Amino acid sequence: MTDPTREWIQRQLLQALAWGGYMCLMVWFGLRYGPISSGTLAIALVVGFGLWGCSELLRSRALSRGWLSGPGYALAGKTALAVFLLPAIPQLILYVVLTSGLKFGWLSLPGGAANYTFGAVILYWINSIVPLGLWAGVWISTQAVRRYRQEELSRLRAEAARSALEFEALRARLNPHFVFNALNNLRALINEDTERARDLVTRLSNTLRHALDHGTSQRVSLGRELEVVDDYLEIERVHYETR
């Protein structure tokens, strides 16, 4: 199973849990006004599955149009507009289902008819906007946290890669054999010629400092380069002696 397929299945399971719970909540509220009926179940199913589809449509639109990459006020405005308009889809489907079902006797409701007065329609609309808005808020927050973690991980990886490049560049500038030879010569000079050993430590320190500073400095003076060359030649002179 590929990663996109696994991610899609996991997302749909979470969607089923969320909107399935909302359908159960709608049925529970319907029971408060009378015994459960086919019309009550139809309302819960149509609205629940309709909002499920609206949430998927909102998600697809937001990702394909790059809403999450834009400024916060643009994301908030587009999301609010989508949350306000999308519930019209399941509400229109519900209207067709209820009116047709009641007309042909396929469905029944307490009272025998569906209430589609202006106030009732506004209430139905709000009851769809609220859960879709909550879903959008949770989804956007989750995406924001995920993007932040991904950006932080990318930044850490970039820093690690930069450090690795700097280390490799430093290794290229510092010949290990040169350093090892200088340290061995220093060890021999400590007992033979203390003054020359101190001079060797100073020159080796200057050479290493130049190698480290060279990675961060864009420019260096000719005089400084000549000083480093002089230190390098003196260190090599100790190694090769009369050769």
Image: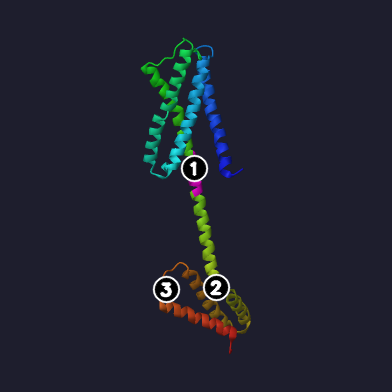
Please say whether residue 137 is visible from this viewpoint.
no
Please say whether residue 54 is visible from this viewpoint.
yes
The kind of secondary structure element at disc 2 is: loop
Q: Nearer the viewer, residue 121 or 212?
A: 121
The kind of secondary structure element at disc 3 is: loop
Numbered disc in front, either 2 or 1: 1
Can you say whether 216 is above or below 123 in the image? Answer: below
Determine which residue is flagged by label 1: 145
Residue 67 position within the rendered picture, expressed as x and y whole percent measured from the top left: 41, 41
Q: Which mark is residue 220?
A: 3
Numbered disc in front, either 1 or 3: 1
Residue 211 position within the rendered picture, expressed as x and y whole percent measured from the top left: 50, 72
Q: Nearer the viewer, residue 219 or 150?
A: 150
The amino acid type of the residue labelled 1 equals Val
The answer to the question of whether label 3 and label 2 lie on touching residues, with beta carbons closer than 8 A, is: no
Image side of residue 82 versus residue 200, left or right: left
User: Residue at (39%, 39%) from the top-left corner?
Assistant: 75
Q: Nearer the viewer, residue 49 or 123?
A: 49
Per the model, the C-alpha gap separating discs 3 and 2 is 18 Å
- Does label 3 or label 2 sit earlier along the sequence? 2
Per the model, the C-alpha gap separating discs 1 and 3 is 44 Å
Determine which residue is flagged by label 2: 174
Residue 85 position within the rendered picture, expressed as x and y whole percent measured from the top left: 39, 30
The amino acid type of the residue labelled 3 equals Val
- Res 164 quadrant in image: bottom right
Q: How many neighbours does mark 2 have within 10 angstroms: few (below 14), some (14-19), or many (20 or more)?
A: some
The amino acid type of the residue labelled 2 equals Leu
Would residue 104 be counted in the magenta stretch?
Answer: no
User: Residue at (51%, 61%) from the top-left corner?
Assistant: 162
Q: What's drawn in magenta, residue-wise?
A: 142-150
